[in-house]
Image (cartoon, rainbow, N blue to C red):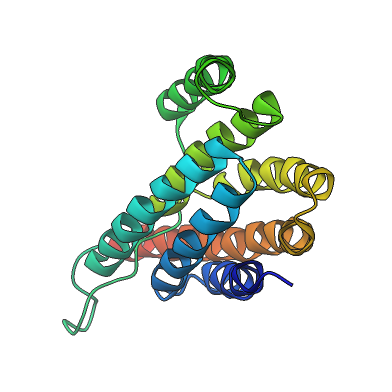
Amino acid sequence: MDYFEVAGLISGMLCVWLLIRQSIWNWPIGLCYALVSLVVFLQTRLYAEFGLHIYYVVMNAYGWYYWSRGAGSSTDGVGVKPVPVTHIGSTATLYVLLSVLVGIPVLAELLLYFTDADMAYADATITIFSFAAMWMTARKMIENWYVWLVVDLLATALYVIKGIELYALLYCVYIGMAVMGWLAWHKTLKAQELEANEGVIAAC
């Protein structure tokens, strides 16, 4: 058994569980997961996945910083409000779609030309979708869970084919956790909207 895969399995599941709960601690745990995964994907010649996890290292640091800033002072003047759950918006959606449509074939062809990458198009597809999902997660956009669901389904199949059994198991579990994450964040979003409406009524 590969101990790096075991470490990735444990830290990866803990990271997403904390993310569902909107805990800021998901970011340092996610940082550990990303660092361990660099070794796993280098060993299996999934170079786009390797590059993706370098990006994860950066984005976990960014998410940690962004969430720690919060959304201004709390109502009692102590600490800060947590970053609210938001929707992505039409402009950002367009940018994400264009990035995915252009990024997948470009990355796949670069992998085929410059490396001995295996399953380059599958690798590139998971990588580009994950780039988008990670940015949306750091910005706390609820639609990140839709994108992660696509990533989880594709990655589970790829890792089974590549023989990375523990990572295949991890991403299989992620499928259910993506649904749980959307439900939890949707509940928070509805609570935020209710609180905002009550604030408007009180102001009137």
Q: Please report the residue visible at 49 percent of the width from the left and 37 percent of the height from the top.
A: 132
Q: Is residue 122 above or below residue 38?
A: above
- Name the quadrant containing residue 89: top left
Viewer can see residue 87:
no
**Is residue 64 rendered to the left or right of residue 183?**
left
- Name the quadrant containing residue 31: bottom left
**Is residue 156 rendered to the left or right of residue 76?**
right
Viewer can see residue 93:
yes
Q: Please report the residue visible at 60 percent of the width from the left and 29 percent of the height from the top.
A: 124
Q: Residue 14 appears at what percent x and percent y?
A: 58, 75
Q: Residue 2 appears at what percent x and percent y?
A: 68, 69
Q: Residue 130 appears at what percent x and percent y?
A: 55, 41
Q: Is residue 74 above or below residue 179?
A: below
Q: Is residue 54 above or below residue 102?
A: below
Between 176 and 38, the residue placed more toward the observer is 38
**Tally of numbered discs:** 0
